[in-house]
């Protein structure tokens, strides 16, 4: 270690959970078991939309080894849950609204017996018309999924005079874009172990992202007080936004079975069950119409987006709200009219996924920007720099950006690193050969944390032990993204001790305060700020004790390199451990609670005006691709990711987020598509749902830009979601540079790149389909079709 | 709750006896890379009996016998890739095997399984047909040998009865001067199923004229077949870009003629033509044929 180093902040320290994960001592939810535990399984719907006429569980209940069979009527408390709109059912009572809906539960002595029991449950359905196209779902007279109608969200932004803006324009660009359903693909599927608690209530260990909202639903379903429901986070094998409602539902179901049997109940989804039931990233249909002047100035932006919300509201109201705030991209325009809708269909419901409403609109915005460059006769870098926000710019929602707005900096760094301008010109001129090269650029601005969605506060607790080791716990959870390392490193920074002296505890709802959900890239900025506050409480006590020990005023002391040192001459007075031991001897508190509440945000729903987020982050991506024009195969050969993160707490963690974000964004751009036809999924596992392999992701050059923001701990902001949200448009813009053809629907797969549109199979498809001699399998042919 | 009766015979004799005893209803398990996935499907009908042949060591060989290469059905894709016999006598097969799945799948998946599963996208089948392979089927009643080109009835169905076990694959090693190559189009660069593929074996005489050609497109027909129309076009002519492009158009036309114009034809028509042209070009550049 650098002997002159004053602080651990920014250092590429090893993750606090690395050792346990690589040696196998880390315990994931499915690794937990208890004596006498039962196995819970869910009977799911047979129809995407149907009325339940009757459910007969008699035969299943009689099967040897079955301990409980439950239906909606067996739920003592609230049958419904939902953070924004409470309309999702733990078990469907009268109606099923998508194929993943659960209608009955079984607890049995083995998973196999439970599976067998599911086959013995007889459910009579009356099929209802299936609504699978969100735009058709908006029509008057479309079958209703919920009584209140299918359009359940309409967010607006109104700025200036849109008619005047178009009147002033020299030309208008109008495009329609579409994006697809995306599966989160956490390597760990959903899993919980629920047990009846010692003194009543229930205790659940699980793979849960947002423990406090899941706890509320369990308590409501079982008629328990919140203090009777203890949710403990197991080491989590990835979430990406995907372990919220689907886990709430699993927690409720396991708790109901544990209550009914008085025994621990374990539930683990297979990958197939997970893909069938879990929520996805929203597909969007986006209508973009921009007016611009010949010099590239944008005079009007008219934007209309329709998000497929699927069967339940889930996070759609918030996801689409972020879209409406960010739908113009980081570009100045006086006249804006944006409408974003979310509608119900009988598809998988859609909710939070890394990006949360930004990957969709960024694809449209950044494609439009390149189209604008074409029309204005500028290159993609020039057009962006000409129009992008600067410090003092006013966004579409009327918010003045009064922090360092580094768009030009990140754009120039991304472009410079990949050699953008020279290559863009050269590749554009090349028209020979079957394999063509292209470079593409994309950038974004992103509101940090929850914004005007709601209260934004979190707790962390720091406890110094008598040997100088430290325990950190928080209501902000580590899902593998590194929040535990960030919070621990911040605490180590405040105490001037090595990270190895800090241990992070996974969230336990009965031991830390409700800190809201761990979403919106708020782990470091909110959780980290709370951890810093907590550590500073204890630091003040420890320095007081050190002052008494040395006779030097605490004001002249600081903590560095494991010691309390005199600021003036850097002389070491006592080790951190000695001061901690002395603090205990003197009976002083060595435990600190830190609370952090984010700065105020405002929003006017009618006009879509307000200070939507308390600060923003800025990023740019540049991609270089090779397009096989004869087959449509695209290879990404080079990639540069540049993000202004405020300040990196751990440079390797930031780089990890950036590289992982690009890999995931590459899948979004080129490969991934969860296909539903009339509400029926065509993919069940990773043999059919294709995510990028290490052979598909090029080495990613990462550039960390640091413009410290006073809103974050040590100036840190966010990187988790920004890292993921602009890779796809950078790639699609590179395809345009290579071929001159604009891809307007994701993913840019073989067919779309070769033909300019997707192949559409008439009628049903997928490997579940019985193949005939006339019907060769086209999507997947690895597995023999099921013999039923 | 036993899903099926499991039998692990130690010899071919025991294996065919087990198949016979179960009246042809048993499923044969080798590497398991297709079967285990199939059994995960919701609603799948499990077989009553599974005969696991993976312990029959005699079915694992890769050897040269006179002019022929003999493969046991348990030879894995990984072994084919690495085998000196294959790399020098049928590099096209090593090349095709190397495109299958991931290292883990290649170390479990077998050539016998790839053939018997009968998926239209099986990557070793087009090269084997182009190499003129025959397969030996054994049963309690004896053995028979058939050409792989006539082995498949339709997707996932072969002429083998449920009581027959594939025990050997045989094909002549490529002669000096023979050129061969395999081209696969997939959606991603690893762990990917063929969208389309083409295998070609081409012989030329001393004057450079093509004397023999075999072209087998993969994942294109419902049953693999050589495209004689295109092969005949090549024979007697000197290799050229124009000739290969024309051969590509002929193969594409033959495929479309068989399958009819379907929703996916718009894509397959030009792409098959391009892949055939590339495969033939590759024969004359970095070919997988006999190292001369």
Image: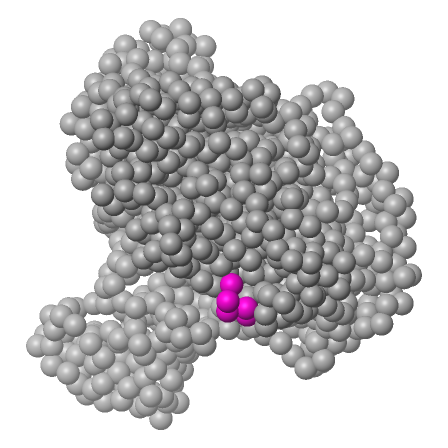
Furthest-front residue in view? B66
- The structure residue drawn at horizontal position 64% and vertical position 25%, both measured from the top left corner, is A762
Task: Please state if A628 lies on the left or on the right of B44 as rendered.
Answer: left
Display coloring: one colour
The x and y percentages for residue A646 are: 28, 50
Relative placement, left or right, of B75 versus B204 is right
Q: Is residue A195 left or right of residue A626?
A: right
Q: Nearer the viewer, residue B238 or A295?
A: B238
Where A484 sits versus A290, above or below?
below
Nearer to the camera, A278 or A638: A638
Q: Quadrant of residue A50?
A: top right
Instruction: Name the image quarter holding residue A767.
Output: top right
Whether residue A31 can be seen here: yes
Question: Which one is in front, A91 or A10?
Answer: A91
Image-quadrant location for residue B234: top left
Residue drawn at x 59%, y 24% as measured from the top left: B259
Residue A247 spot, x, y in % from top left: 62, 57
Who's the residue at 90% across and 55% down the image? A56
Residue B58 included in the magenta stretch of the image: yes
Task: Provide the residue span drawn in magenta.
Answer: B55-59
Q: Indicate the position of residue A96 as horizontal and vertical percent values.
A: 77, 43
- Which residue is outermost to the bottom? A585
Nearer to the camera, A726 or A465? A726
Up the image or down, B85 lies above or below A13; here it is above
Q: Is residue A278 visible?
A: no
Identify the residue at image location x=43%, y=31%: B215
The secondary structure that most of the magenta stretch takes on is helix
A319 vs A717, left or right, is: right
Q: Position of residue A114 (x, y in %)?
A: 76, 65
Q: Any magenta on residue A595?
A: no
């Amino acid at each position: 270690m650098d002997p002159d180093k004053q602080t651990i902040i920014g250092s590429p320290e090893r993750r606090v959970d690395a050792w346990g994960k690589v040696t196998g001592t880390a315990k994931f939810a499915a690794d937990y078991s208890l004596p006498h535990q039962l196995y819970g399984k869910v009977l799911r719907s047979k129809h995407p939309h149907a009325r339940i006429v009757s459910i007969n569980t008699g035969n299943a209940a009689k099967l040897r080894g079955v301990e409980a069979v439950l239906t909606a009527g067996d739920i003592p408390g609230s049958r419904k849950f939902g953070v924004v709109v409470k309309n999702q059912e733990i078990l469907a009572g009268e109606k099923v609204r998508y194929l993943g809906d659960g209608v009955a539960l079984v607890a049995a002595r083995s998973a196999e017996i439970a599976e067998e029991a599911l086959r013995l449950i007889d459910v009579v359905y009356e099929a209802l018309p299936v609504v699978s196209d969100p735009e058709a779902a908006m029509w008057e007279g479309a079958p209703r999924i919920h009584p209140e109608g299918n359009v359940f969200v309409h967010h607006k932004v109104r700025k200036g005079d849109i008619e005047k803006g178009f009147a002033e324009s020299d030309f208008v660009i109008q495009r329609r874009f579409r994006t697809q359903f995306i599966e989160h693909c956490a390597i760990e599927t959903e899993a919980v172990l629920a047990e009846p608690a010692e003194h009543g209530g229930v205790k659940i260990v699980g793979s849960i992202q947002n423990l406090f909202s899941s706890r509320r639903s369990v308590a409501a379903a079982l008629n328990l007080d919140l203090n009777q429901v203890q949710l403990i986070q197991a080491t989590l094998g990835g979430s990406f936004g995907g372990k919220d409602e689907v886990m709430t539902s699993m927690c409720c179901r396991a708790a109901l079975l544990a209550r009914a049997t008085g025994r621990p109940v374990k539930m683990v989804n297979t990958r197939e069950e997970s893909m069938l039931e879990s929520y996805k990233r929203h597909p969007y249909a986006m209508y973009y119409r921009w007016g611009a002047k010949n010099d590239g100035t944008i005079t009007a932006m008219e934007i209309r987006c329709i998000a497929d919300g699927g069967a339940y509201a889930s996070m759609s109201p918030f996801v689409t709200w972020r879209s409406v705030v960010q739908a113009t991209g980081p570009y100045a325009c006086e006249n804006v009219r944006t409408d974003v809708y979310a509608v119900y269909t009988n598809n998988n419901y859609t909710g939070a996924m890394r990006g949360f409403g930004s990957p969709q609109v960024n694809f449209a915005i950044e494609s439009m920007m390149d189209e604008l460059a074409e029309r204005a006769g500028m290159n993609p870098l020039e057009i962006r720099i000409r129009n992008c926000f600067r410090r003092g710019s006013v966004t579409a929602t009327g918010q003045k950006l009064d922090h360092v707005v580094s768009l030009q900096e990140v754009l120039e760094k991304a472009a410079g690193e990949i050699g953008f301008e020279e290559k863009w010109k050269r590749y554009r001129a090349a028209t020979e050969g079957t394999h063509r090269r292209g470079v593409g650029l994309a950038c974004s601005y992103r509101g940090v944390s929850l914004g005007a969605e709601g209260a934004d506060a979190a707790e962390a607790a720091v406890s110094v032990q008598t040997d100088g080791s430290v325990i950190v716990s928080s209501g902000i959870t580590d899902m593998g993204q590194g929040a535990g390392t960030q919070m621990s490193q911040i605490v180590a920074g405040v105490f001037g001790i090595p990270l190895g002296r800090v241990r992070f505890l996974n969230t336990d709802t009965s031991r830390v305060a409700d800190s809201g959900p761990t979403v919106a890239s708020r782990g470091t900025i909110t959780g980290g700020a709370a951890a810093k506050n907590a550590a500073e409480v204890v630091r003040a006590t420890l320095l007081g004790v050190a002052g008494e020990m040395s006779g030097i005023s605490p004001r002249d002391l600081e903590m560095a390199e494991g010691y309390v040192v005199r600021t003036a001459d850097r002389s070491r007075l006592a080790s951190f451990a000695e001061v901690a031991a002395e603090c205990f001897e003197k009976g002083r508190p060595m435990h600190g609670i830190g609370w952090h509440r984010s700065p105020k945000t405002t929003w006017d729903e009618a006009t879509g005006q307000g200070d939507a987020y308390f600060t923003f982050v800025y990023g740019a991506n540049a991609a270089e691709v090779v397009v096989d024009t004869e087959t449509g195969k695209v290879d990404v050969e080079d990639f540069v990711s540049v993000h202004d993160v405020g300040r990196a707490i751990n440079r390797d963690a930031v780089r990890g987020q950036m590289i992982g974000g690009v890999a995931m964004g590459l899948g979004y751009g080129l490969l991934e598509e969860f296909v539903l036809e009339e509400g029926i999924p065509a993919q069940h596992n990773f043999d059919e749902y294709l995510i990028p392999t290490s052979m598909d992701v090029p080495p990613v050059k990462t550039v960390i830009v640091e413009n410290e923001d006073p809103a974050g701990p040590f100036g840190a902001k966010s990187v988790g979601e920004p890292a993921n949200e602009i890779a796809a448009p950078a790639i699609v813009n590179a395809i345009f540079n290579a071929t001159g053809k604009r891809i307007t629907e994701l993913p840019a797969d073989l067919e779309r790149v070769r033909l300019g549109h997707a192949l559409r199979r008439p009628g049903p498809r997928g490997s579940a389909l019985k193949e005939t001699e006339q019907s060769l399998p086209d999507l997947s042919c690895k597995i023999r079709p099921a013999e039923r | 709750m036993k899903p099926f009766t499991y039998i692990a015979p130690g010899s071919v004799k025991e294996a065919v006896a087990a198949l016979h005893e179960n009246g042809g209803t048993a499923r044969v398990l080798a590497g398991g890379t297709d079967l285990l996935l199939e059994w995960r499907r919701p609603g799948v009908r499990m077989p009553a009996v599974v005969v696991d042949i993976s312990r029959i060591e005699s079915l694992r060989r890769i050897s040269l016998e006179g002019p022929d290469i003999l493969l046991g059905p348990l030879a894995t894709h990984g072994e084919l890739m690495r085998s000196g016999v294959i790399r020098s006598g049928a590099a096209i097969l090593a090349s095709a095997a190397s495109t299958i799945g991931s290292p883990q799948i290649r170390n479990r998946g077998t050539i016998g399984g790839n053939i018997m599963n009968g998926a239209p996208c099986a990557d070793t089948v087009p090269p084997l047909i182009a190499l003129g392979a025959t397969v030996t089927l054994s049963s309690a009643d004896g053995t028979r040998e058939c050409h792989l080109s006539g082995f498949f009835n339709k997707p996932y169905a072969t002429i083998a009865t449920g009581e027959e076990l594939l025990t050997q694959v045989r094909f002549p090693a490529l002669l000096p001067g023979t050129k061969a190559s395999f081209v696969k189009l997939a959606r991603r660069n690893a762990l990917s199923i063929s969208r389309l593929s083409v295998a070609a074996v081409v012989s030329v005489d001393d004057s450079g004229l093509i004397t023999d050609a075999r072209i087998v497109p993969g994942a294109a027909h419902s049953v693999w077949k050589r495209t004689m129309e295109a092969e005949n076009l090549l024979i007697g002519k000197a290799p050229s870009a124009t000739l290969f492009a024309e051969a590509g158009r002929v193969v594409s036309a033959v495929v479309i003629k068989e399958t009819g114009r379907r929703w996916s034809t718009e894509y397959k028509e030009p792409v098959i033509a391009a892949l055939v042209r590339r495969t033939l070009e590759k024969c004359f550049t970095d070919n997988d044929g006999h190292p001369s």
